[in-house]
Image (cartoon, rainbow, N blue to C red):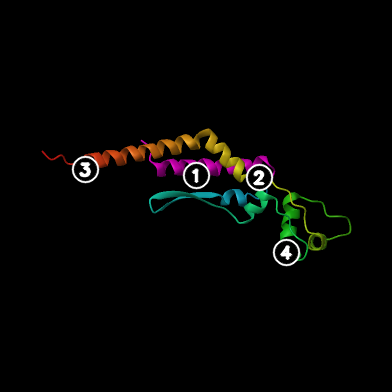
Amino acid sequence: MITLEQALVKVGEELKAAMQNELKSNGSYNTGDLSNSIDYEVLQNGDGYQLARRMLAYGNYVDQGIGRRPGKMPPQQDIIDWIDLKRIPIPTGLQKETFAFLIARKIGDKGTNPRPRPFINPSISKVMRDSGEKLIGEGATNEIVQAVNEQLQSITVKA
């Protein structure tokens, strides 16, 4: 017999796996940092439960495709790391640091175009459709039946 809390833990595990798979399939998997940061925790508050998601803050930017506005240059070291990660060829006559500076300056001047790569809602929809609704329904039903049985057992009959 599965409890509601156990059902939510299972749904959280399935959501984590689904989000990680979605990141890989939509082209958002680079270093694995975002994927590895995804986690779920079941919190009990008052009479109910909450399934809380945690991940690196930039996960929402990836999901919603929020571009960078013009104004401030991004850190040059981040651009160098990105050049190395993507194995981007350095133009002839430039050093990697100079090339990274030029990219950072252009981003600072022009910003970047938003490119949404949704992975949160598609994962939630898939898990809930495939197994989540059934698991949560079963766990909730079991807890209701158990509570009713406990109440019935505590009733004393007077003769």
Mark 3 is on which residue type?
Ser
Residue at the spot 66% in from the left edge and 53% down from the top edge: 61
Disc 3 packing (10 Å; few <14; some 14–19; many ≥20): few
In this figure, which residue is indicated by the disc labeled 4? Answer: 75
Task: Give x and y (percent) for residue 140.
Answer: 40, 40
Q: CA distance from mark 4 to mark 3?
A: 66 Å
Classify mark 4: helix, strand or loop. loop
Is label 3 or label 2 in front? 3
Question: Relative to residue 66, is residue 152 depicted above or below?
Answer: above
Residue at the spot 70% in from the left edge and 50% down from the top edge: 65
Is label 4 or label 3 in front? 3
In this figure, which residue is indicated by the disc labeled 3? Answer: 154
Classify mark 2: helix, strand or loop. loop
Q: CA distance from mark 1 to mark 2?
A: 18 Å
What span is colored magenta in the figure? 1-27
Quadrant where the C terminus sits is top left
Mark 1 is on which residue type?
Gly
- Residue lying furthest bottom: 72
Question: Which numbered dot is residue 118?
Answer: 2
Is label 3 or label 1 in front? 3
Mark 2 is on which residue type?
Pro
